[in-house]
Amino acid sequence: MALRLTIPESPSETDRDAVIAPLRAYNIRQAGDPRIRPVAILLTDEGGDHVGGLWGKLVYDWLFVELLAVPEEYRGGTTAPP
Amino acid sequence: MALRLTIPESPSETDRDAVIAPLRAYNIRQAGDPRIRPVAILLTDEGGDHVGGLWGKLVYDWLFVELLAVPEEYRGGTTAPP
């Protein structure tokens, strides 16, 4: 009983799904539905340009921050009122 | 000079791109093209089913492993000859 390894030339989303499927199944067995939801906080400057922000996801009600970008010239400042 | 924050109800790939753009631009300025390429190693059992593997990416010629899944019953074993 042995596994075969294949290394696709151009890995696809289907390949990613094949790798993640047993991890997802394990997590669901152990802890139920992770209720995964993407989260974004977008930063827009006065000219209307997107200049960064936060990208992450909610998993089991925990926030995982994947990306965080604040342009140097805006750091230490405040945000405009909503 | 203040930034506006927006939190989209349904974050999209376009939102992710907006967050990652300044990070990408910074990296390219500092270190040149990161030459990002996805990498997959797929595990297939004798019945032809995909049962896990590795998913990651090459960035600046470094391998980042994002996902790794080997089914419990195959751990400690060997792989079939190619």
Image (cartoon, coloured by chain):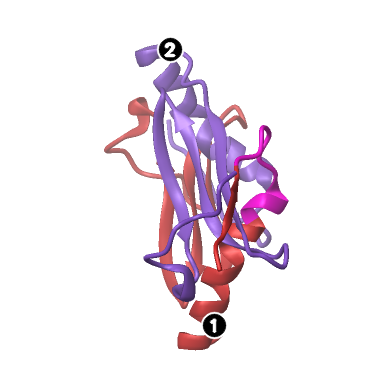
Chain colours: A red, B purple
Specify the label residue B59 is tagged with: none
Q: Which residues are magenta?
A: A7-16
Residue A48 placement (x, y as % from top left): 62, 32
**Mark 1: which amino acid?**
Ile
Secondary element at tag 1: helix
Can residue A51 be seen by looking at this rendering?
no
B76 or B55, which lies in front? B76
**Disc 2 designates what residue?**
B32
Q: Are marks 1 and 2 on the same chain?
A: no
Residue A52 seen in this snapshot? yes
Above-or-below relation of B43 to B32:
below
Query: Which structural element holds mark 2?
Result: loop
Instruction: Give me the residue at 56% from left, 70% from top.
Output: A22
Chain letter belonging to callout 1: A
Q: Amino acid at mark 2?
A: Gly
Chain letter of disc 2?
Answer: B
The residue drawn where x is 60% and y is 27% is: A47
Q: Is residue B9 left or right of residue A82?
A: right
At 51% from the left edge and 43% from the top edge, which residue is drawn?
B4
Image spot of residue A39 (x, y percent): 54, 59
- Residue at the image point whose x is 34% and y is 27% from the top: A72
User: On the rendered image, what quadrant is the N terminus of chain A found in?
Assistant: bottom right
Along the viewing direction, whichever of A61 and B41 lies nearer the viewer:
B41
Whether the magenta-drawn stretch holds residue A14 is answered as: yes
